[in-house]
């Protein structure tokens, strides 16, 4: 009787162990997959296309900047602003660039919808200045950003750089959240805060967020 009971306990334990091992091996996190798929890394990567999904980093590697931005679902505002600004030909004509692209959430935390609409439709000079504050005239990987002390953006602003755990801090508040998308002439890094000196207008106006 004791022998049969012991055998049953061993069998249950073995099944439980096999179940746990199978779960961990068969279902890796999307964040881990994203880090290995195309070389991107960061906490937001887990929410973005990976593996063989449309817009995964490998599929975007070597694409023009506007095409890459259009496939990253958290960059719809930045991508729309870039197209509205007419800066795409200028950027694609450069030998190397780094795009520090604020997420949609970062834009919504900074600007009201009225403010954004006004820049995209009427105040193109301000829009171009805003976008140039997020572009560097050379290609920088995440490690380059972490190792450098500062970088100068296309609008002429010198922005401090430092390490932030495994990510890079840009200025006082921004941080990379999914870094190292490879484009035809450089890199795109998704960041979580809008750079530049424009005032915060989020929540203001009839159509504010």
Image: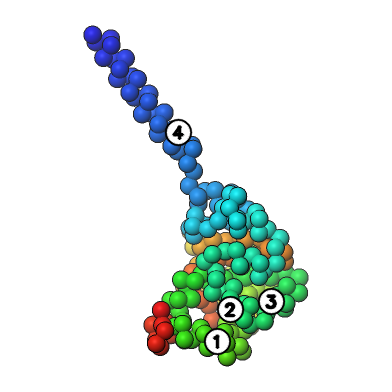
Mark 4 crowd level (few <14, some 14–19, many ≥20, 10 Å Cα): few
Q: Is residue 125 left or right of residue 194?
A: right
Label 2: how many Cα within 10 Å (few below 14, some 14–19, many 20+)? many
Q: Is residue 152 above or below residue 42?
A: below
Tell me the SS state at disc 3. Answer: helix
Number of numbered tags placed on the structure image: 4
Asked if disc 4 and disc 3 are in contact, CB closer than 8 Å, the reply is: no
Residue to which mark 1 is pinned: 119
Badges 2 and 1: C-beta atoms under 8 Å apart? Answer: yes
Where does the C terminus fall, quadrant-wise? bottom left
C-alpha span from label 3 to label 2:
10 Å
Quickly name the residue at label 2. 81
User: Quick one: label 2 or label 1, which is nearer the N terminus?
Assistant: 2
Badge 4 element = helix
N-term mark: 2 or 4: 4
Instruction: Sort mark 3 into few (<14), some (14-19) or many (20+) by Cα contacts within 10 Å.
Output: some
Disc 3 or 1, which lies upstream in sequence?
Answer: 3
> Residue 150 has which mark?
none
At 51% from the left and 63% from the top, the residue drawn is 177
In this view, the residue in front, 52 or 183, is 52
């Amino acid at each position: 009787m004791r022998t049969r009971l012991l055998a049953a306990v061993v069998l249950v334990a073995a099944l439980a162990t096999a179940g746990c091992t199978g779960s961990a091996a068969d279902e890796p996190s999307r964040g881990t997959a994203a880090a290995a798929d195309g070389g991107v890394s960061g906490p937001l990567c887990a929410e973005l296309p990976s593996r063989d999904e449309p817009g995964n980093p490998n599929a975007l590697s070597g694409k023009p900047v506007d095409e890459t931005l259009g496939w990253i679902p958290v960059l719809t505002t930045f991508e729309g602003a870039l197209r509205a600004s007419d800066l795409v030909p200028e950027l694609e004509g450069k030998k190397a660039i780094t795009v520090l692209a604020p997420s949609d959430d970062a834009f919504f935390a900074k600007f009201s919808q009225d403010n954004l609409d006004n820049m995209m439709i009427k105040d193109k000079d301000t829009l171009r200045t805003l976008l140039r504050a997020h572009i560097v005239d050379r290609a920088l990987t995440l490690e380059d950003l972490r190792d450098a002390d500062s970088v100068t953006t296309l609008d002429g602003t010198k922005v401090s750089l430092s390490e932030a755990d495994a990510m890079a801090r840009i200025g006082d508040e921004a941080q990379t959240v999914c870094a190292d998308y490879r484009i035809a002439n450089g890199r795109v890094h998704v960041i979580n805060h809008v750079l530049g000196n424009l005032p915060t207008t989020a929540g203001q106006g009839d159509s504010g967020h």
